[in-house]
Image (cartoon, grey):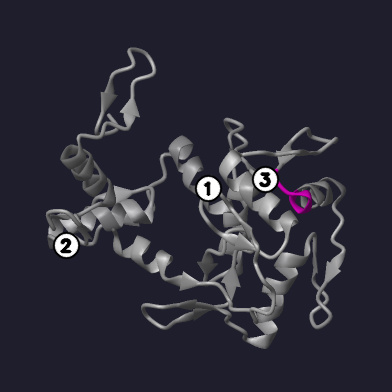
Amino acid sequence: MTDYSLIMNNLTEPKTPDTKEKPYHCDICGKSFSNCGNLTKHKRTHTGGKPYHCDVCGKSFSQNGHLTHQKHIHTGEKPYQCNIYGKSFPESAPLRSHKRVHTGEKPYHCDICGRSFSQGCDICGKSFSQGGDVLKHKRTHTGEKPYHCTICGRSFSGSSDLIKHKRIHTGEKPYHCNICGKSFSESSTLTRHKRIHTGEKPYFCNICYKAFSTNSYLISHKCINTEENPYQCDICGKSFSQRL
């Protein structure tokens, strides 16, 4: 398990008083719920069911609340307003997250480092330090991609993803290695490159404890150990342990 995975597995959602029994159990993962409606919504995360359809764009959603949010995107409606700052939002969850800017509340806690975070996804419970990261993450649930490339038309869930993509067209490489001078289009690529100079290998195999400079090398190594070949050629059907 990587350090990142270890941390994410130990981030806990805010605790609420456990005053209700939870007699409804998911027969797939065992999670329990206080009412049948919540269990039904949860099960769609396993089945992929999306029974709510937008009559404007035709997109489908697993929860009615997500459909309501999508309709607000089409209409521009923002019915949820902050009574302190006056800022408006298309749904209640972003308003709750925004209010923590004023209150300083940090209800999401890491069991490893003890740090607390103000933002969390109300769908899956994942925690974030910035509200913008939550909004971008929630689009993985809704499928929303509001940022469009004017050159090729490709769409993205976050503005930063669009900026990085545009560098494919422009050839821009704004991140420079201060050791060898080589340039890169993304900061993460520069970070990985610098490990060539420093020898840093932060990713460890939990089977043999061998260390690697990138997570992709670790994944490839684990596939070799387990004889797993997750990458398949869509032409001949042959499978490989690495993406070629």
Residue 198 picture location, percent across and down: 14, 62
230 vs 97, left or right, is: left
Looking at the rendered image, the quarter that the N terminus falls into is bottom left
Q: In this view of the protein, which residue sits in the foreground, 136 or 42?
A: 42
In this view, 227 is above or below 110: above
199 vs 234, left or right, is: left
Q: Residue at x 25, y 34 (%)?
A: 228
Residue 218 picture location, percent across and down: 22, 49
Q: In this view of the protein, which residue sits in the foreground, 33 or 12?
A: 33
The local secondary structure at tag 3 comes to: loop
Nearer-N-terminus badge (1/3): 1
Alpha carbon separation for disc pair 1 and 3: 33 Å
Q: Amino acid at mark 3?
A: Pro
Of badges 2 and 1, nearer the viewer stands 1
Mark 1 neighbour density, 10 Å: few (under 14) some (14–19) many (20 or more): few
Mark 3 neighbour density, 10 Å: few (under 14) some (14–19) many (20 or more): few
Within the magenta stretch, is there residue 122?
no
Q: In this view of the protein, which residue sits in the foreground, 214 or 27?
A: 27
In the rendered image, which residue does mark 2 sit on? 200
Alpha carbon separation for disc pair 2 and 1: 40 Å
The label on residue 55 is none
Q: Residue at x 79, y 34 (%)?
A: 57
The local secondary structure at tag 2 comes to: loop
In the rendered image, which residue does mark 3 sit on? 146
Can the viewer see residue 145? no
Nearer-N-terminus badge (2/1): 1
The label on residue 28 is 1
The local secondary structure at tag 1 comes to: loop
